[in-house]
């Protein structure tokens, strides 16, 4: 901190230091400047902005369509559910859309049942934000991620993965130890003693 100085003097000091005179607070009176490396300053600011964006991830609304009509294969419904689950785990809201064609409009209860089933299957990580409703020939609802449930599930998955990780090395060590034990037992087996005994007379006879 050198206090208030003339612009010419500030530029002279920056030039003498081999650095740049950078205005960092233009709205203050008088404006605040710093003598620094401008290239490094820009890099640090870009790095900080990127970190802030990562922390404040913007939630989006993802749309998942259950086919062009009610005649969608159960396997395809399962694929759509997996997509919705992935979006919820990432923190996004999911709009589930079911289209109706032709005479399917006469059986709206089938759409209600399908939506109810989806709500139940996603209830472990999501909650209904907008209940199922009709708009023309399409039925839709909005499911939002339940942060506490999502965090709890992620913690359980992390704990399970951590508990499973040390198992493989321990199992390998146990297998190696068992192999050494079996080898030791084999070397001390009665068959080995008989072989040694059978060789002994031949050795004595040769002498």
Image (cartoon, rainbow, N blue to C red):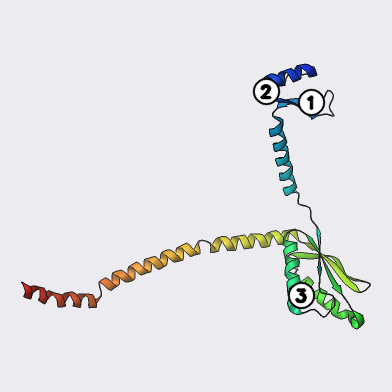
**SS of the residue under disc 1:** strand
N-term mark: 2 or 1: 2
Quick check: marks 3 and 1 in contact, CB under 8 Å?
no
N-term mark: 2 or 3: 2
- The answer to whether residue 61 shows anywhere in this view is yes
| Whole-percent x, y for residue 194 in the image | 19, 78
Q: For residue 70, which numbered disc appears in the image?
A: none
Q: Residue at x 75, y 62 (%)?
A: 88
Q: Residue at x 73, y 37 (%)?
A: 45
Residue 50 occupies quadrant: top right
- The answer to whether residue 106 shows anywhere in this view is no
Residue 37 occupies quadrant: top right
Residue occupied by mark 2: 18
Relative to 83, say whether 39 is above or below.
above
Quick check: marks 2 and 3 in contact, CB under 8 Å?
no
Residue occupied by mark 1: 32
**Mark toward the viewer: 2 or 1:** 2
Relative placement, left or right, of 183 versus 167 is: left
Residue in front for this viewpoint, 181 or 19: 19
Relative to 188, say whether 92 is above or below.
above
């Amino acid at each position: 901190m050198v206090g208030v100085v003339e612009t010419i003097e500030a530029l002279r000091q920056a030039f003498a230091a081999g650095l740049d005179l950078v205005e960092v607070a233009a709205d203050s009176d008088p404006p605040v400047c710093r003598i620094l490396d401008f290239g490094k300053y820009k890099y640090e600011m870009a790095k900080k902005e990127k970190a802030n964006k990562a922390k404040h991830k913007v939630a989006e609304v993802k749309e998942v369509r259950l086919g062009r009509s009610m005649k969608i294969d159960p396997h395809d419904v399962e694929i759509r559910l997996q997509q919705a689950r992935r979006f919820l785990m990432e923190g996004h809201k999911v709009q589930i859309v079911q289209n109706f064609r032709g005479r399917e409009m006469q059986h709206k209860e089938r759409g209600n049942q399908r939506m109810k089933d989806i709500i139940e299957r996603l209830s472990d990580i999501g909650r209904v934000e907008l209940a199922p409703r009709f708009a023309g020939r399409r039925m839709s609802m909005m499911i939002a991620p339940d942060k506490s449930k999502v965090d709890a599930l992620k913690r359980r998955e992390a704990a399970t993965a951590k508990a499973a990780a040390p198992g493989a090395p321990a199992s390998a060590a146990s297998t190696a130890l068992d192999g050494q034990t079996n080898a030791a037992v084999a070397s001390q087996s009665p068959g080995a003693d008989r072989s040694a005994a059978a060789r002994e007379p031949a050795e004595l006879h040769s002498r």
